[in-house]
Image: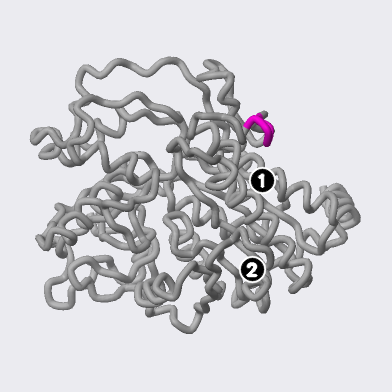
């Protein structure tokens, strides 16, 4: 077995010119995170900091930089900022790429609305933005070894095949749409899917044709849901969060038809980006599996019955069963990146609490959520919502009785807090400290 392992290692090293056992990016290294003020990027930032990296954040304005700096005050010495006003401009990232070891490129538009000009609003920002970052690396920091690009299930799905009952999507699949077709298509969802496919393909083509010093890994999530960790307003929510907000604000009187039948928690997407910095150069389908809006509404009805009773959430009782649809294969991400995925239930609890908290804040009222206890599917442990970034379970209200009233600490036994003793900070109403699930005394 050792002989076979060595042969594989030597073969990989010969092909790539790199030691396959060597870490491309080490703890303490600087990583450029583009589009750092976005929904997904905020969770990538959390994962990168948790993994021990320092992060240079590219944002579109000083205001965005100040917002991140304020929210991440405890990591001030591990953050730097650079202003990139327009990612499509030639040389936009020339300064940004200097002084870093790797790049996580998340900046790209996400909208499913119909646009009058697909090239201007979707295709150019996605394609030129991605290629522009790679050009800047070659010209201004050729020592960079790894670029992780946020792609999408949109780059994999073949919309022309419909729901494809019996078919299973994996990293081997590519959206077949061409650039010329994408320019002309009138459907907003199809245009968005095209932009992600063409941008990812452009990254792989760049590496194949230019043979730079860096390698690429792409992260392909489907619908991404989860709690808000970036500055947000209810009237300007990111697309996927707005997709859920309509289920709790009275906009939908009946359960809507599901459009895309695969999902993932945004915190797992963040973890995947960090893991891909030192993983083999490849595509990674980051998904927790299939879902429907009916399942979402059922979870809301169980944990937030007042929303159904008041007509803010459509009653899922009697909703028609979904049609037969495709399945998804996340085995590569589990095997290579070591991914384990949060449940739809824990994701929805966190997201709804997050949105109700935001609504109360904007209205100047107080929102107090009852702590919710669920089993973490990844560990089998019972967890309660602690309202903390990255826990997988979030309650946005004041401290529950289980927390010590004298010190306002979580009631974990010494040595049992999964966040680590250094992170067991005072709760201050919603305990801004932990970065991992917490086991409560049973």
Q: Cα distance, mark 1 to mark 2? A: 18 Å
Depth check: 297 or 402 in front?
A: 297
Q: Is residue 378 visible?
A: yes
Q: How many marks?
A: 2
Q: How far across and down, in percent of the image, does residue 364 sit?
A: 11, 63
Q: Residue at x 60, y 36 (%)?
A: 194
Secondary structure state at the residue bearing disc 2: loop
Residue span colored magenta: 177-181
Q: Residues within 10 Å of mark 1 (few under 14, many from 20)?
A: many
Closer to us: mark 1 or mark 2?
Answer: 2
Q: Which residue is mark 2?
A: 93
Give left or right: position of 190 versus 139: left
Q: Is residue 24 magenta?
A: no
Q: How far across and down, in percent of the image, does residue 420 sit?
A: 39, 70
Give left or right: position of 166 versus 430: right
Q: Residue at x 22, y 57 (%)?
A: 358
Secondary structure state at the residue bearing disc 1: helix
Give left or right: position of 72 versus 104: left
What color scheme is it? one colour
Give left or right: position of 240 versus 168: left
For the view shown, which residue lies furthest in the front direction?
116
Q: Which residue is mark 1?
A: 200
Q: Residue at x 65, y 36 (%)?
A: 171
Q: Residues within 10 Å of mark 2 (few under 14, many from 20)?
A: many
Magenta stretch, overall SS: helix
Quarter occupied by the C terminus:
bottom left
Q: Is residue 173 visible?
A: no
Q: How far across and down, in percent of the image, does residue 181 sit?
A: 64, 30
Q: Quadrant of residue 436?
A: bottom left
């Amino acid at each position: 077995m050792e002989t076979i392992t060595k042969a594989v290692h030597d073969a990989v090293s010969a092909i790539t010119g790199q030691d396959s056992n060597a870490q491309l990016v080490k703890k303490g290294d600087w990583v450029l995170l583009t589009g750092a003020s976005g929904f997904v990027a905020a969770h990538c930032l959390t994962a990168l900091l948790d993994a021990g990296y320092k992060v240079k954040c590219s944002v579109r304005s000083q205001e965005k930089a100040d917002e991140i700096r304020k929210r991440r005050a405890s990591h001030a010495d591990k953050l730097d900022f650079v202003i990139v006003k327009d990612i499509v401009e030639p040389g936009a990232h020339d300064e940004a790429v200097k002084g870093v070891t790797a790049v996580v490129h998340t900046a790209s538009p996400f909208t499913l609305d119909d646009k009058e000009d697909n090239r201007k609003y979707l295709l150019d920002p996605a394609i030129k933005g991605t290629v522009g970052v790679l050009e800047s690396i070659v010209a201004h920091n050729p020592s960079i070894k790894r670029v992780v690009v946020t792609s999408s299930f949109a780059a994999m799905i073949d919309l022309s095949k419909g729901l494809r009952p019996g078919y299973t999507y994996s990293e081997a699949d590519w959206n077949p749409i061409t650039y010329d077709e994408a320019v002309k298509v009138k459907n907003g969802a199809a245009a968005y899917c095209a932009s992600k496919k063409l941008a990812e393909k452009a990254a792989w083509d760049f590496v194949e044709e230019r043979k730079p010093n860096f390698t690429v890994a792409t992260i392909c999530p489907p619908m991404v849901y989860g709690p808000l960790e970036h500055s947000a307003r209810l009237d300007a929510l990111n697309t996927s969060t707005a997709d859920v907000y309509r289920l709790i604000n009275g906009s939908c009187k009946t359960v809507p038809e599901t459009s895309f039948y695969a999902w993932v928690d945004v915190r797992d997407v963040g973890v995947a980006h960090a893991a891909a910095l030192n993983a083999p150069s490849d595509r990674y389908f980051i998904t927790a599996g299939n879902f429907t809006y009916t399942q979402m509404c059922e979870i809301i009805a169980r944990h937030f019955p007042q929303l159904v009773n008041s007509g803010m959430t459509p009653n899922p009782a009697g909703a028609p069963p979904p049609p037969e649809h495709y399945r998804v294969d996340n085995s590569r991400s589990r095997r290579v990146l070591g991914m384990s995925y949060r449940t739809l239930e824990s994701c929805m609890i966190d997201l709804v609490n997050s949105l109700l908290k935001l609504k109360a804040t904007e209205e100047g009222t107080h929102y107090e959520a009852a702590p919710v206890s669920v089993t973490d599917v990844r560990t089998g442990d019972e967890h309660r919502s602690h309202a903390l970034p990255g826990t997988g379970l979030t309650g946005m209200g004041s401290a529950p009785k289980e927390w010590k009233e004298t010190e306002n600490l979580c009631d974990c036994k010494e040595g049992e807090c999964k966040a680590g003793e250094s992170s067991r900070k005072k709760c201050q109403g919603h305990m801004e400290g932990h970065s991992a699930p917490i086991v409560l005394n049973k």
